[in-house]
Image (cartoon, rainbow, N blue to C red):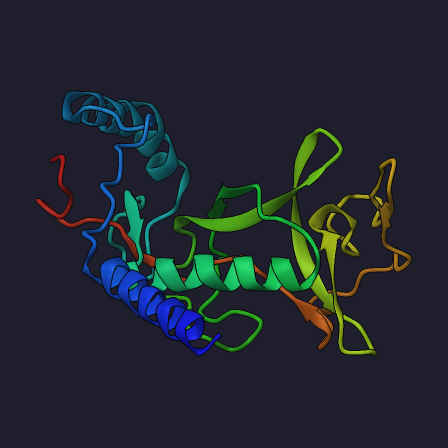
Amino acid sequence: MAAFVFFLSCNTEKKHADDTNQEPQEVKAPKQLISIPEAKNGYDNYTHKRVKLIEASEAPLEDGTKFIASRFGEYDLETVKNYIAYVEQEAKASGVKVETLRFYFSTYPDKKEDAQHREIKHPRQNTFFILPTMKVDSMNLGFYIKRLSDGKKEALLIRDYPGVLENGLGQIKTTQKSFASMLPNFKKNSFQDDDESLILNDSHMQPPPEQGSDFN
């Protein structure tokens, strides 16, 4: 018996050593990659078909200078890695799986600070936010986390959050569960302490100066 334990221990240590010495597995290129000419074409199409309309529809800034539309936003790589890890952690704690990360176009309000009294660096600028989705029957739908009184967590649909839909109450019925809000009356900035948003924003948005982007 002692010999068997010794043999098993040696094999385990050898396997661990082999694992640590293995080279990282090569990552295959995603199918969604596009060529540089395609990216340049898309960038220019946006310039001609969207940017000019945005800038023409906006009044000059307070100092009289022309309003310049945003062209990109960026996060450092560690923020993106941490965000994905955090979203997966909270989804797992709630018993659901993250299906997709959904990018929504958005616009900052015409104010100098947000509801949490944080500075809005670029009022009226177009931006984007990222929302994780989970599978509800055959649909991917965005979700947030509700912390329950017993310490557990539950994933609820964004569309069912009070005030998100025009009637204040959205409902998606599934074969397993009805995701519905029982709080149709919405008060601005009424996000509760037990509600946990997984929506990522606050990127470094850039209304680029001349030569400020990679494509012009």
Q: Is residue 55 left or right of residue 139?
A: left
Outermost residue toward the left?
211
Residue 180, position as x, y percentages in the image: 86, 49
Q: Quadrant of residue 165?
A: top right
The image quadrant of residue 134 is top right
User: On the rendered image, what quadrant is the C terminus found in?
Assistant: top left
* Spot occupied by residue 76 in the image (x, y as percentages of width and height): 27, 61
Question: Relative to residue 213, is residue 116 depicted above or below?
Answer: below
Q: At 27% across and 59% down in the image, what residue appears?
A: 19
Residue pictured at 40% horizontal, 74% vertical: 3
Residue 67 visible to the viewer = no
For the point 55% across and 63% down, which residue is it?
A: 89
Q: Would residue 57 be found to the left or right of residue 170 on screen?
A: left
- Number of dots carrying numbers: 0
Q: Is 151 situated above or below 171?
A: below
Q: Residue 86's spot in the image, x, y percent?
A: 50, 64
Residue 190 in view: yes
**In this rendering, is residue 151 above or below 212?**
below
Report the front residue among 112 and 163.
163
Quadrant of residue 36 within the rendered picture: top left
Find the residue positioned furthest to the right.
Answer: 182
**Residue closest to the eye, 130 or 69:** 130
Residue at 33 percent across and 39 percent down: it is: 55
